[in-house]
């Protein structure tokens, strides 16, 4: 048995049609629950009536002038619409709460039931303070109408603790009066899970690793291939070639990405301090030791990755200690007799010629073989100059924010000048040059007049194609020096592979240079 009778009446388009239908209903003393009137269609919802009255009503309406058809339906159009919206609201993987102006809960979807551990039946129609405290943002929303985005909230209810992100909007009428409010709610654990999925895709990990040259793409492929394992990686390349950037990418692409990435610059600290920083210490183990001791960076990186930059700067004593850590997978804090297990991936980097250091007796050969499991050679910028325009664009975008500028690009002469230079300081130097140019630039486009290249000997040259007074451009001087260094290495080591290693460049780079300068050494 139905609880309400709903009728759909098809009519001609005539003024007073709906009124005539309502009059028929009143004539047999029935009260109307709701009416919806459209062009050529009238919908009526009335309380339950007996079959006899229903037949009379339908016959009377059918006989009205202009009525074409009448039939019983299950839902009014607005009810159908509402149910569709509610089904949609219930199907989304996000909590949705709607309250009216007085704070009564009108919508509490399925997902909210999971987050808050309450059912719809327990909350719909109840005041929102049954669920949230009176200072909850959705409550200020119905008073002040001020929207909010992704606020992090933690609430404790009788049913447990919920930690979520919430975004709220006021519902307003055409005159701006607040009718209620709606808030979406994201479970913080799901948000973190999603952020991890998105931020660890190959694309997002390499988002800030700019470069499309063959050389850089090869490195990206190699990094992808080696990231899943646990082997030690030794990144080699000149200063500023992006060793730390790639070390971070290896970490982010690995299964350890949700654990810490701890970079340590071995050159930045004196030996004694570096040892206590790396391995930690017990309370009172030396003067100045912190109360309670210190954990040590290896321990900080537990489960994750430690990046030992400038490994060539480690003293012989620390080299021996590091070797023991690598052999045993254990560390011992200074002042402690106990060893602790560590589960840390080690990535190291150097711009030093470790092979030469071994010969000179300043780097342990046994440690070298432990570290040199997966060597990755990062090419200097001068061997992938085609990446310069991309890098400059990237730095303009990045630095516009930092410097509060609105520079939109560069002209070709500017880039051509950058292409002529040999970049001994690599990408770090390029970033500095772009930053200086942006500071000097008073237009929207970087031009040659904004270019100052800071050469390593400290001369700041306003690069206007001037010669150095020795009838050579500085770029020529760099090329000559490069040529000489290559020739010397080739004479000394006799093979390209060995010479490339000694010079800290890849085999391909050296072959290209030999071709470029037409070097003959045999
Ligand atoms: N491919 C790249 N795309 C964008 N920025 C880069 C890239 N490579 C390096 N950089 C930027 O250049 C600067 C130097 O990079 P990084 O510190 O990783 O170099 P490095 O080889 O570790 O240098 P060093 O040996 O001196 O420690 C950083 O600001 C880094 O963000």
Image (cartoon, helix red, strand yellow):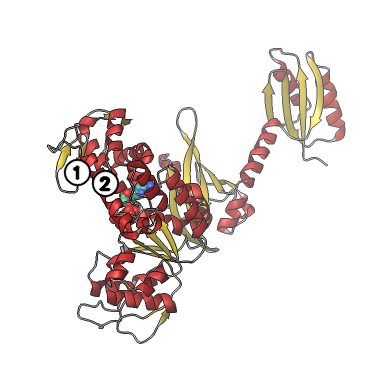
State the residue in front, 259 or 491.
491
Q: Position of residue 4 (x, y in %)?
A: 76, 37
> 442 or 111, which lies in front?
442
Q: Residue at x 36, y 81 (%)?
A: 332
Residue hosting label 2: 429
Quadrant location, the N terminus: top right
Answer whether labels 1 and 2 touch (C-beta < 8 Å): yes
Does residue 202 appear to the left or right of 265 in the view shown?
A: right
Classed neighbour count for the residue bearing mark 1: other residues with Cα under 10 Å, few (<14), some (14–19), many (≥20) = some
Q: Along the line of sight, which residue is nearer the eye, 232 or 41?
A: 232
Residue 372 tag number? none
Q: How many marks?
A: 2
Q: Could you tell me which secondary element the residue under label 2 belongs to?
A: helix
Asked if one can make out residue 235 in the rendered structure from this viewpoint, the answer is: yes
Q: Looking at the image, which residue is at 81% across and 27% down? A: 71
Which residue is label 1 attached to? 454
């Amino acid at each position: 048995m139905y609880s309400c009778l709903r009728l759909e009446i098809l009519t001609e388009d005539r003024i007073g049609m709906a009124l005539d239908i309502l009059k028929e209903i009143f004539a047999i003393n029935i009260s109307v629950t709701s009416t919806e009137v459209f062009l050529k269609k009238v919908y009526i919802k009335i309380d339950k009536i007996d079959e006899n009255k229903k037949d009379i009503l339908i016959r009377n309406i059918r006989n009205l002038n202009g009525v074409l058809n009448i039939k019983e339906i299950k839902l009014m159009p607005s009810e159908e619409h509402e149910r569709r919206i509610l089904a949609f609201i219930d199907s989304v993987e996000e909590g949705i709460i709607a309250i009216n102006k007085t704070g009564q809960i009108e919508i509490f979807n399925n997902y909210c039931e999971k987050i808050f551990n309450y059912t719809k039946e327990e909350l719909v129609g109840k005041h929102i303070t049954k669920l949230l405290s009176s200072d909850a943002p959705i409550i200020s929303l119905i008073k002040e109408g001020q929207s909010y985005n992704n606020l992090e909230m933690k609430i404790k209810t009788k049913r447990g603790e919920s930690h979520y992100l919430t975004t709220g909007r006021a519902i307003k009428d055409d005159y701006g009066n607040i009718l209620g409010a709606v808030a979406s709610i994201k479970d913080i654990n799901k948000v973190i899970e999603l952020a991890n999925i998105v931020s660890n895709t190959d694309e997002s990990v390499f988002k800030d690793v700019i470069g499309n040259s063959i050389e850089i793409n090869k490195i990206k492929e190699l990094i992808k291939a080696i990231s899943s394992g646990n082997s030690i990686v030794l990144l080699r390349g000149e200063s500023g070639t992006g060793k730390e950037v790639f070390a971070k990418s290896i970490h982010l692409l690995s299964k350890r990405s949700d654990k810490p990435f701890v970079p340590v610059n071995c050159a930045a600290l004196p030996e004694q301090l570096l040892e206590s920083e790396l391995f930690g210490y017990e309370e009172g183990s030396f003067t100045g030791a912190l109360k309670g001791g210190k954990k040590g960076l290896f321990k900080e990186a537990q489960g994750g990755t430690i990046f030992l930059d400038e490994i060539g700067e480690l003293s012989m004593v620390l080299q021996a200690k590091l070797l023991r850590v690598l052999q045993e997978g254990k560390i011992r804090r200074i002042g402690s007799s106990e060893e602790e297990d560590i589960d840390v991936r080690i990535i190291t980097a150097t711009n030093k010629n470790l092979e030469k250091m071994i010969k000179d007796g300043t780097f342990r050969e046994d440690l070298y073989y432990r570290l040199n499991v997966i060597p990755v050679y990062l090419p200097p910028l001068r061997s992938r100059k085609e990446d310069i325009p991309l890098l400059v664009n990237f730095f303009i975008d990045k630095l516009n924010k930092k410097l509060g500028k609105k520079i939109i690009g560069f002209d070709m002469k500017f880039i051509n000048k950058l292409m002529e230079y040999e970049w001994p300081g690599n990408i770090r130097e390029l970033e500095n040059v772009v930053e200086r140019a942006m500071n000097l630039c008073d237009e929207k486009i970087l031009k040659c007049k904004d270019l100052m290249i800071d050469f390593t000997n400290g001369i700041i040259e306003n690069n206007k194609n001037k010669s150095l007074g020795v009838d050579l451009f500085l770029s020529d001087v760099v090329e000559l020096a490069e040529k000489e260094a290559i020739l010397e290495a080739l004479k000394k080591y006799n093979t390209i592979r060995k010479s490339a290693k000694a010079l800290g460049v890849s085999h391909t780079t050296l072959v290209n240079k030999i071709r470029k300068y037409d070097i003959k050494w045999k």
